[in-house]
């Protein structure tokens, strides 16, 4: 016995059809200033039967039906034999999903599950719909005709769903005749509301449920066993996207300093980034961005991008590029802040050398919660300092002042940390990265080797 299957297919077409006739307006007199009053015409489903008329009249014989109003209803559903195709045909498509991270609510760059979808040949039908326009005068009727009459020339396309594997979602709406008025030779003293009927039809498809199969094919081929890295390769889901080769033009590196990018020769490793670094002058090279970018296309300032792959991040740093008008060796790099790493530690007020300055000695007086990143060690057991008191801290530690105990203490101990940490300097707005090898560096500045950057023209 077949299982029950209902997918709102006809209902979705009706909803999309109704949106064609939504948000239209007619005039209803003028205001005291002489401006025309516009009234939106509502739309509802229902034919002009006795039951629909009773609903419109609020189930009362003393109420007049409200107008203007648009109603629509299905006037016919016919099997369209002319559009019949092979009823035994089964279409198979393979779908590969990207991994969805439920914690961040975002899709990742590696492949998730893979499926095969088997779609059965749908059945063709012609859906006929009648639209009734309830108006109080000829002016309203003519206004609606002029607004809607130009839409169907010869037809209007609609879409019932945005599912990309639904091959029956598209249809078109054709007009199929218009009855201008429902009035005939008047009898008696009644004055019924004039109704204009407009007929339309749509070629649609009705589908059976698709069959969904989880793929059981080989998704990885590990070809580096001879290197002794089989375990790492098996765990590397990036291989699901296929064998990827990174090719860098001429083997050049790039150097990021502040918001400037510079090309460097492949053998240039002289740039070192640390917390007390002042930006040096760009290395004196003869590599120019214009010569490189012209090989691959025309740069679009503010649109073209360079993606930097930071080894300490799971995602790329993305920024748009603009040529530096004063130095063709440099590009102005406008980083998308959403692609930068998130801080893991509370921000510090400044980066200081505790042997040179301290609270009330070149720095403001101690305030509860103030934090400093130290570049030198300070203090020793039994030897308090005037500025820092009993504090004993190592270089690369972060210290914080506690007003309750009126003393400084180590908030981040660089000697015991085994994870990568990020923190921002509130004074300079520069973000730093701490690595387990005991070094603070600017989190994303420095040089990027070949294969660690890509150019998107």
Image (cartoon, helix red, strand yellow):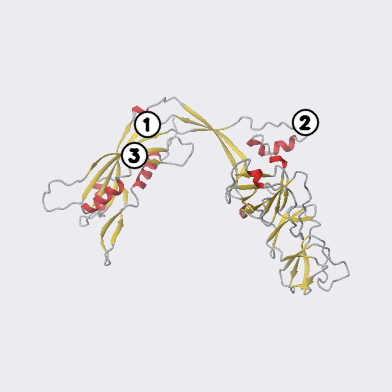
Instruction: Look at 34% across and 27% down and name the residue there.
Output: 82
Q: Can you say whether 178 is above or below 410 in the image?
A: above
Identify the residue under disc 1: 124
| Quadrant of image for the N terminus | top left
Q: Secondary structure at mark 1?
A: strand
Left or right, residue 34 beside residue 233? left
Q: Residue at x 82, y 72 (%)?
A: 389
Q: Residue 67, how many percent across, how many down?
A: 25, 54
Residue 351 bears which disc, if any? none
Report the residue marked by disc 2. Answer: 226
Between residues 348 and 4, which one lies in front from this camera angle? Answer: 348
Report the front residue among 420 and 407. Answer: 420
Residue 455 position, x and y percent, is 63, 44
How many labels sit on residues?
Answer: 3
Q: From the viewer's side, name the closer residue of 283 and 117.
A: 283
Residue closer to the observer: 78 or 354: 354
- Please indicate, yes or no, whether residue 248 appears anywhere in the rendered image: no
State which tag comes first along the sequence, 3 or 1.
1
Could you say where residue 114 lies in the image, as x and y percent from the top left?
Answer: 58, 35
- Left or right of 406 on screen, residue 5: left
Which image quadrant is residue 325 in? bottom right
- Disc 2 and disc 1 in contact, CB within 8 angstroms: no
């Amino acid at each position: 016995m077949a299982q029950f299957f209902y997918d709102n297919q006809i209902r979705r077409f009706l909803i999309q059809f109704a949106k064609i006739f939504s948000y239209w307006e007619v005039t209803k007199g003028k205001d005291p200033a002489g401006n025309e009053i516009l009234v939106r015409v509502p739309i509802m489903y229902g034919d002009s039967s006795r039951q629909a008329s009773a609903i419109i009249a609020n189930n009362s014989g003393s109420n007049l039906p409200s107008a203007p109003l648009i109603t629509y209803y299905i006037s016919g559903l016919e099997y369209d034999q002319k559009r019949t195709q092979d009823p035994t045909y089964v279409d198979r498509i393979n779908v590969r999903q990207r991994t969805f991270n439920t914690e961040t609510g975002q899709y990742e760059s590696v492949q998730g599950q893979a499926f095969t979808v088997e779609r059965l040949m749908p059945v063709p039908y012609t859906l006929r719909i009648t639209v009734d326009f309830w108006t109080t005068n000829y002016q309203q009727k003519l206004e609606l005709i002029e607004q809607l009459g130009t839409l169907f020339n010869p037809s209007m396309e609609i879409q019932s769903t945005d599912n990309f594997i639904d091959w029956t979602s598209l249809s078109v709406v054709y007009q199929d005749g218009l009855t201008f008025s429902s009035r005939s030779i008047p009898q008696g003293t009644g004055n019924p509301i004039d109704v204009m009927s407009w007929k339309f039809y749509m070629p649609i498809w009705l589908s059976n449920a698709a069959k969904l199969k989880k793929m059981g094919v080989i998704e990885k081929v590990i070809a580096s066993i001879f290197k002794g890295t089989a375990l790492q390769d098996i765990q590397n889901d990036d291989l699901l996207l296929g064998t990827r080769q990174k090719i860098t033009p001429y083997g050049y590196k790039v150097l990021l300093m502040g918001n400037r990018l510079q090309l460097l020769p492949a053998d240039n490793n002289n740039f070192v980034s640390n917390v007390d670094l002042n930006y040096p002058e760009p290395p004196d090279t003869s590599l120019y961005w214009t010569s490189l970018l012209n090989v691959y296309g025309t740069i679009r300032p503010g649109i073209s991008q360079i993606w930097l792959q930071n080894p300490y991040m799971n995602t790329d740093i993305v920024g748009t590029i603009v040529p530096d008008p004063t130095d063709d060796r440099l590009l102005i790099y406008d980083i998308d802040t959403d692609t930068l790493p998130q801080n893991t530690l509370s921000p510090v007020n400044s980066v200081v050398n505790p042997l040179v300055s301290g609270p009330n000695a070149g720095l403001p007086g101690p305030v509860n919660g103030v934090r400093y990143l130290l570049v030198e060690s300070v203090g020793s057991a039994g030897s308090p300092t005037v500025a820092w008191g009993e504090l004993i801290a190592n270089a690369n530690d972060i210290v914080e002042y506690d007003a309750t105990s009126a003393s400084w203490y180590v908030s981040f101990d660089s000697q015991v940390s085994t994870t990568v940490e990020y923190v921002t300097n509130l004074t300079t707005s520069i973000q730093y990265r701490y690595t387990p090898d005991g070094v603070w560096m600017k989190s994303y500045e420095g040089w990027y080797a070949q294969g660690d950057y890509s150019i998107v023209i």
